[in-house]
Image (cartoon, coloured by chain):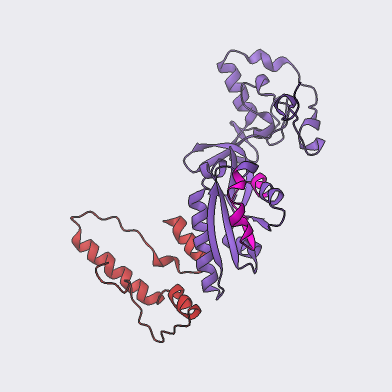
Amino acid sequence: MIVAEQKSLDEIKRLVGEAEKILVVGCGTCVTVCFAGGSREAAIVAASLRMASRLDGEVKKVSDVTVQRQCEWEYLDAIAKEVGEVDVVLSLGCGVGVQAIAEHFPNAWVVPGLNTTFMGLPTEQGIWAERCAACGDCVLGLTGGVCPIARCSKSLLNGPCGGSLDGHCEISKETPCAWQLIHDRLTDKGKLEVLMDIQPPKNWKTARDGGPRRIVREDLMLGKEE
Amino acid sequence: MDYLRKLLQEIGLEPERVRMFNLSAAMAGQFVDATKEMMEKIREVGPNPLRAAGNKAAGVERAGEPARAAPDKENS
């Protein structure tokens, strides 16, 4: 899932500025699961803004609504009326959701309420960890299902650096060395010989380094009948 | 509870306005102590500034409103 964290209320207050009518828009997908921007969080942020503005001597009308997915036009159509009635939309979606609202409602002023952080999973209650860097050329088949791009601090492809100590990365004892995990897993599976293949330098053009990415699936496109 | 207290602080309210006590139905004495403790604390921090702010916005002045821990309605 996409994992995000809420911005501080101070920053959110600065972002909404002088706006009197505010619509907080939650998203029912990834950010709901990571407790950052679902319907519950949208209601809490709206109530917090109402209380904070009252204490600041301002009168702000803050309402909230949550859509199933902020990143698809059809779900955004459902809130067109509410968006049209406010001075600012505070999106509690990921960065994709914020941009989807801005793109779908050109007349609306949209600000983010979250910091979109990474793609990952909850490793235990209350802890999320990065698992995928969306490099566009998956190497998990070579590494036993442990990603050296997202989980190795240096994104190394041919084993650990000298900073691997007792299974930890040199950046923090909280960070397991990805190459230790890869080695342990391949050993466990009896496939350590996979590591004997030296990986050539990775082609980063498929990652962000190649610029904004786009996927075109002509078989799924509408209006092209044979 | 930590989250809620942090939230109150961010909003501009005193975090000590909310606290959780774990009590069973058989702990009447501790319940009274906890209630007294909270009443003292709320008297110390004063009336809810949101109420004053709301009244001000609505043009209602309540000068010298006494501090209290419970809402107006009794038995609510």
A196 up-or-down from A47: above or below: above
In depth, the one of A89 and A35 nearer the eye is A89
Residue at (72% x, 35% y) in the render: A154
Residue at 52% over, 48% down:
A38
Q: Quadrant of the C terminus of chain B?
A: bottom left
Which region is colored magenta? A75-98
Q: Quadrant of residue A179?
A: top right
**Vertical order, A59 against A113 (above or below):** below
Residue B37 falls left or right of residue A38? left
On the question of residue A37 being in view, the answer is no
Q: Is residue A82 magenta?
A: yes
Q: Quadrant of residue A223?
A: top right
Image location (x, y in percent) of residue A36: 54, 48
Please identify the quarter of the rendering in which residue A171 is found: top right
Q: Nearer the viewer, residue A51 or A9?
A: A51
Determine whether, in the image, residue B8 is placed left or right of residue A106: left
> Percent position (x, y) of residue A197?
73, 16
Question: Which is more toward the observer, A146 or A208?
Answer: A208
Instruction: Point out residue B22 in the picture as x, y percentages from the top left corner.
Output: 29, 55
Is residue A165 shown in magenta? no
Viewer-side residue, A146 vs A11: A11
**Image quadrant occupied by the N terminus of chain B:** bottom left
Q: Colour of chain B?
A: red
Q: Is residue A136 above or below residue B36?
A: above
Chain coloured purple in the rendered structure:
A
Query: x and y percent of residue A126 in the render?
Result: 49, 43
Compared to residue A182, the image places residue B39 above or below, namely below
Residue A43 visible in the shown view: yes
Name, please, the residue furthest toward the bottom.
B63
